């Protein structure tokens, strides 16, 4: 993921573990100070809420990259790489 807009950052993290809440807070802080960052995240819902851009990796290689919106809309890619 690369740093991004705050629009997806204000969603509730209720029910998430402390680590997820801390990552969300760090993302909001980096966004407000216009810093970029990356994260490796296995919680797809959380990752898609906070990311501006997504890279899918398989066996250490980038196999797909797109916006979260494009990933949500691409059933073939989500089925193939994410098992969703």
Image: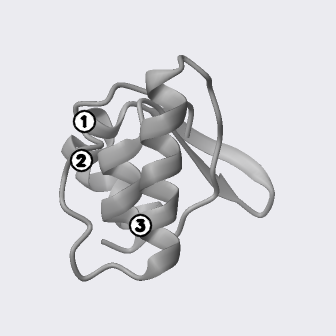
Number of numbered discs visible in the structure rendering:
3
Residue on which disc 1 sits: 69
Question: What residue lies at 44% left-to-right and 51% top-to-bottom?
Answer: 25
Name the side, left or right, on which 70 lies relative to 41: left
Relative depth, front residue between 26 and 4: 26
Mark 2 and mark 1 in contact (Cβ < 8 Å)?
yes
Instruction: Please tell me whether mark 2 sits on a helix, a strand or a loop.
Output: helix
Question: Which of the two discs, 3 and 2, sits closer to the camera?
Answer: 3
First in sequence: mark 1 vs mark 3:
3
Q: Which mark is residue 21?
A: 3
Name the side, left or right, on which 35 lies relative to 48: right
Instruction: Please tell me whether mark 3 sits on a helix, a strand or a loop.
Output: helix
Residue 78, percent across and down? 35, 58
Instruction: Please tell me whether mark 1 sits on a helix, a strand or a loop.
Output: helix
Residue 42, percent across and down? 52, 70
Residue 9, percent across and down? 30, 43
Residue 1, located in which quarter of the rendered image? Answer: top right
Question: What residue lies at 41% left-to-right and 66% top-to-bottom?
Answer: 21
Residue 50, located in which quarter of the rendered image? Answer: top left
Q: Compared to 77, does 66 lie above or below?
A: above
Q: Compared to 3, does 23 lie above or below?
A: below
First in sequence: mark 3 vs mark 2:
3
Residue on which disc 2 sits: 72
Quarter of the C terminus within the rendering: bottom left
Mark 2 and mark 3 in contact (Cβ < 8 Å)?
no
Q: CA distance from mark 3 to mark 2?
A: 23 Å
Question: What residue lies at 19% left-to-right and 52% top-to-bottom?
Answer: 11
Badge 1: how crowded within 10 Å, few (<14), some, or many (20+)? some
Residue 41, percent across and down? 55, 63
Question: Which of the two discs, 1 and 3, sits closer to the camera?
Answer: 3
Question: What residue lies at 56% left-to-right and 32% top-to-bottom?
Answer: 2
Relative depth, front residue between 53 and 26: 26
């Amino acid at each position: 993921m690369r740093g991004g807009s705050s629009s997806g950052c204000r969603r509730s993290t209720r029910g998430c573990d402390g680590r997820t809440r801390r990552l969300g807070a760090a993302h909001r802080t980096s966004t407000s100070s216009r810093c970029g960052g990356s994260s490796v995240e296995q919680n797809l819902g959380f990752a898609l809420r906070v990311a501006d851009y997504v890279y899918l990796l398989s066996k250490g290689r980038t196999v797909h990259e797109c916006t979260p919106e494009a990933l949500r809309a691409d059933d073939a890619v989500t089925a193939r790489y994410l098992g969703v």
